[in-house]
Image: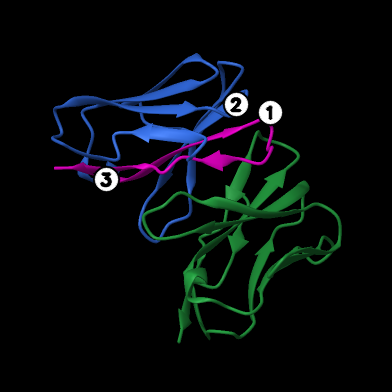
Chain colours: A blue, B green
Amino acid sequence: ETGVTQTPRHLVMGMTNKKSLKCEQHLGHNAMYWYKQSAKKPLELMFVYSLEERVENNSVPSRFSPECPNSSHLFLHLHTLQPEDSALYLCASSKEGGGDTQYFGPGTRLTVL
Amino acid sequence: GQNIDQPTEMTATEGAIVQINCTYQTSGFNGLFWYQQHAGEAPTFLSYNVLDGLEEKGRFSSFLSRSKGYSYLLLKELQMKDSASYLCAVRFVYGQNFVFGPGTRLSVLP
């Protein structure tokens, strides 16, 4: 059993497709995060939401669009991605924002053809 | 940005002890986290240090020296299931979140 779930677990898409990644947390947390993990690179923070408000966007290209409709759900909408966007996309949540201990979901393995 | 350094790979034998080091820039330091990540799985929280000294949690211990910008994760009585990547993450007083190190891939051999 995990407190943070992500769907789909694997996704293959073409560069012209539109798809969405979904994350749900069952921990009663108030902050949610999207990270990108590429081979041989550190985890890269993409977006942070605290109490459903976006508080950080680390210069992520506009082809990635986050959405946080409530404190339990987080989406990452994908549009016209590039092959270099292929990576593991991890969602995390924490009780509070500002660097509280984060709990990660299993990730979505994305391949862009 | 903040640089966080860890060795890329380490190898140890089942039953042994291994120490994984992490160094970081000290300016604005506000806490250090260790995570374990098995291949294809999510990172899981191991430990948190904000004051100098050793935090022990079963077979795992984590040490912090704030003045030196240095931490280590100590794994005792290694088991095959400890083969994983170990991620060091530092929280800074500015900005909202952590900066992760590159991770250390540990292989435990029989």
Q: Name the residue carrying label 2.
A: A31
Could you say whether the residue bearing mark 2 is in a helix, strand or loop?
A: strand
| Res A96 label | 1
Task: Tell which of A90 and A44 is nearer to you.
Answer: A90
Is mark 1 in CB contact (under 8 Å) with mark 3?
no
* Sequence-wise first label, 1 or 3: 3
| Span shown in magenta | A87-113
What residue sits 51% from the left and 60% below the top? Answer: B102
Q: Position of residue A108 (x, y in %)?
A: 33, 40
Cα distance between the residues tagged 1 and 3: 30 Å
Q: Name the residue carrying label 3.
A: A86
* Sequence-wise first label, 2 or 1: 2
Q: Chain of mark 2?
A: A
Front label number (1 vs 3): 1
Is residue A40 left or right of B32 when viewed as pictured?
left
Question: Please, what is the three-letter code of the amino acid marked with disc 1?
Answer: Glu
Is mark 2 in CB contact (under 8 Å) with mark 1?
yes
Kindly give the residue lying farthest to the front in the view shown: A1
Task: Tell which of B23 and A97 is nearer to you.
Answer: A97
